Structures are given as C-alpha cells and as structure tokens.
Amino acid sequence: MEKGWKEVFFTAHEYLAVIARDVLENEGIKAIIMNQHDSAYQTFGEISVFVEEKDEKKALELLKEL
C-alpha cells in the first residue's frame, strides 16, 4: 500500500469489507478495499480496508462495532 494509508479493517469476507467501506464513506472518509485473496484458492488471503493516515483514528472508532 502507498505511504500515508493505514489498514483499519481486515476480513476473509468481501461483503464485510464493502460494509466497512460504506460506513466510512458515509462519514466522509475516503476508503479503499484491497483484495489479497489467492486467485486460485479464494479461501486463502484477506481483504483489507485502508484509509488515509489522518482519518485512521476516526475510522477505527466507527468500525469498532463491525
């Protein structure tokens, strides 16, 4: 990931990453999803949600319940 971005959520399920991204974006926080699942075996790997470093604390607070 590029410098200045922080991982705030990770999961093995894509739908949870999408929900996390939507929660953040609804609060005005730019979020991106990075899918690191193995292309041959979808059960291996993680899906991560990243936000800009300046939004990390607020994002973690918003996602605490997720």
Image (cartoon, rainbow, N blue to C red):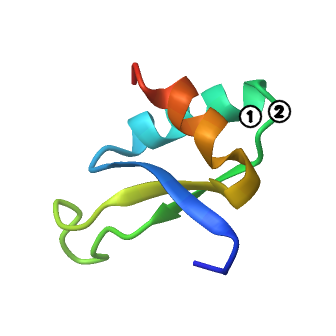
Q: Which mark is residue 28?
A: 2
**Amino acid residing under circle 1:** Glu
How far across and down, in percent of the image, does residue 4 sit? 70, 71
Which amino acid lies under the numbered mark 2 shown in the image of this protein?
Gly
- Look at the image and tell me in which quarter the N terminus lies: bottom right
* Disc number for residue 50: none
Where is residue 52, by image quadrant?
A: bottom right
Label 2 element class: loop
Along the horizontal axis of the image, is 11 left or right of 53?
left
What is the total number of numbered labels drawn onto the structure image? 2
User: Label 1 crowding class (10 Å Cα cut-off): few <14, some 14-19, many 20+?
Assistant: some
**Which residue sits at x=65%, y=66%?**
5
Distance of mark 2 from mark 1, alpha carbons?
A: 5 Å
Screen quadrant of the C terminus: top left
Circles 2 and 1, Cβ within 8 Å, touching? The answer is yes
Is 17 drawn above or below residue 4 in the view shown?
A: above
Of residues 64 and 40, the one nearer the viewer is 64
Is 36 or 3 nearer to us in this picture? 3
The residue located at (31%, 68%) in the rendering is 37
- Label 1: which secondary element: helix
Q: Is residue 65 left or right of residue 61?
A: left
- Residue at image coords 83%, 33%: 28
| Residue 44 x, y percent position in the rendering | 18, 67
Tell me the number on the disc at residue 25.
1
To which quarter of the image does residue 36 belong?
bottom left
Q: Is residue 20 visible?
A: yes
Q: Residues within 10 Å of mark 2 (few under 14, many from 20)?
A: few
Q: Which residue is most to the right?
A: 28
> Measured from the top left, where is residue 34 in percent x and y?
51, 64
Q: Is residue 9 left or right of residue 33?
A: left
